[in-house]
Image: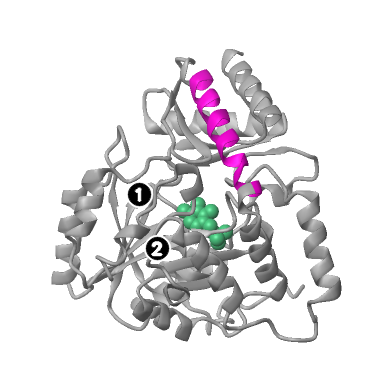
Amino acid sequence: MIDQPQPKAFNFLRPALDQLVAYSSQSEELETSVDKLDANESAYDLPAELKEKLAWQYQEIISSNRYPDGSHGELKSAIAQYVQESCEAITPANISVGNGSDEIIRSLFIATCVGTNASMLTADPTFSMYKIIAQTLGVTPISVPREETHFTIKRGQADQAIAQAEASGHPVKMLFVVHPNSPTGNPLSNAEIDWLKQLPEEILIVIDEAYFEFNGHSLVNELPNYPNWIILRTFSKAFRLAAHRVGYCIAHPEVIAALEKVRLPYNLPTFSQAAAIVALQNRQQLLAKVSEVQNERDKLYNALNAEPRLKVWESASNFLYLRLRGESLEEINQKQAELVNALKEKGTLLRHTANGIRLTVGTPAENERTQKNLLSYLDH
Ligand SMILES: *Cc1c(COP(=O)(O)O)cnc(C)c1O
């Protein structure tokens, strides 16, 4: 490594990047085996017979010397069929796929805000990638808070922020909501959905349904009425394919056409497309785990909620959001950092984020160990 750049060298790099830190996950630093409950992945690998099917495809059908199908035709058809279970009107023309939904989020910025004065709006706490990607692209992120008891969006403040941004020449072109939200686990309320419906159609409303399968409620049925809405989904959670990086979105064909223009030509490797198709073909088998996760989540909620030193929120997803009780946020965060470190030493990875702790529901054995470790830590 060349480690002695002159301070003035590399000034071809954008100064704004100085403020950013490269993304890294906790588990990359660890060597021992752990209960990995910090990233909301599925606790379950693909079943062996599905891996065999994929291995067979790799040996017999896939040509490694050929570029992937850049139109994603077969995958889009398979996705459209799946989405039709929720909304019959959806066709492959309503679908675009990406290298994880993260790539689609980036494409959305390129298609709406980049190279303009436009800004984007989130309600915090929420998925951190929206703001991170905005910053890497030089787009101004605006955020408003959520109310403290149920984490619904402070809609009056959001309306004000939208008006202010417009007045200052930085109109909001994109608004991100997560249904159900991460890290707090709450689905959109009816009042929030009504609010989204009356927002100006100059704003692209992104409804991130990464955890849709755990909640069972989608807003895809509203798409025909609201052409400025887009639904984001992923194969990284309930479909157990985080390793393959496949995400997709559902929107009006005009929006899809714009996304297709700005993405890289061969954004999704052949093997990942094949994995997503196999997962969809076997969705009944794969999604059978969802009800187990829901039961485990509710068991864990009840056990942790009985502990007076914890505040736990109900969740419509595959994770729980909790907070230690304390005098000030500073004290709470200090104690939470200690707790997360102590559990890491015991082999349980949790995520300390947004003044709370996010705990992914794992296998029954993982959940039992986590519950035991967490409660015995609080008793010491
Ligand atoms: C996990 C997650 C995603 C998925 O991202 P991928 O890039 O598809 O793995 C998207 N949005 C939210 C809110 C998530 O929690």
Quarter of the view holding residue 131? bottom left
Badge 1 density bin: few <14, some 14–19, many ≥20, Cα 10 Å: many
The furthest residue to the right: 59
Residues shaded magenta: 285-304
Q: Specify whether 274 is left or right of 70.
A: right
Q: How far, Cα to Cα, is label 1 from label 2?
A: 33 Å
Asked whether 294 falls inside the magenta stretch, the response is yes
At x 25% / y 51%, what residue is drawn? 193
State the SS at label 2: loop
**Within the magenta stretch, is there residue 14?**
no
Amino acid under disc 2: Glu
Q: Name the residue under label 1.
A: 124
Residue 217: x, y in percent? Answer: 39, 47
- Taking the spot 54% from the left edge, 23% from the top edge, the residue there is 299
36 left or right of 214 in image: right
Direction from residue 287 to residue 186 in the image, left or right: left
* Spot occupied by residue 318 in the image (x, y as percentages of width and height): 53, 40
Of tags 1 and 2, the one toward the viewer is 2
Q: Which of 249 and 263 is in front in this view?
A: 249
Q: Is residue 25 visible?
A: yes
Above-or-below relation of 133 to 41? below
Label 1 sits on a secondary structure element that is: strand
Q: In which quarter of the image is residue 190?
A: top left
- Which residue carries the number 2 mark? 88
Label located before the other in sequence (1 or 2):
2
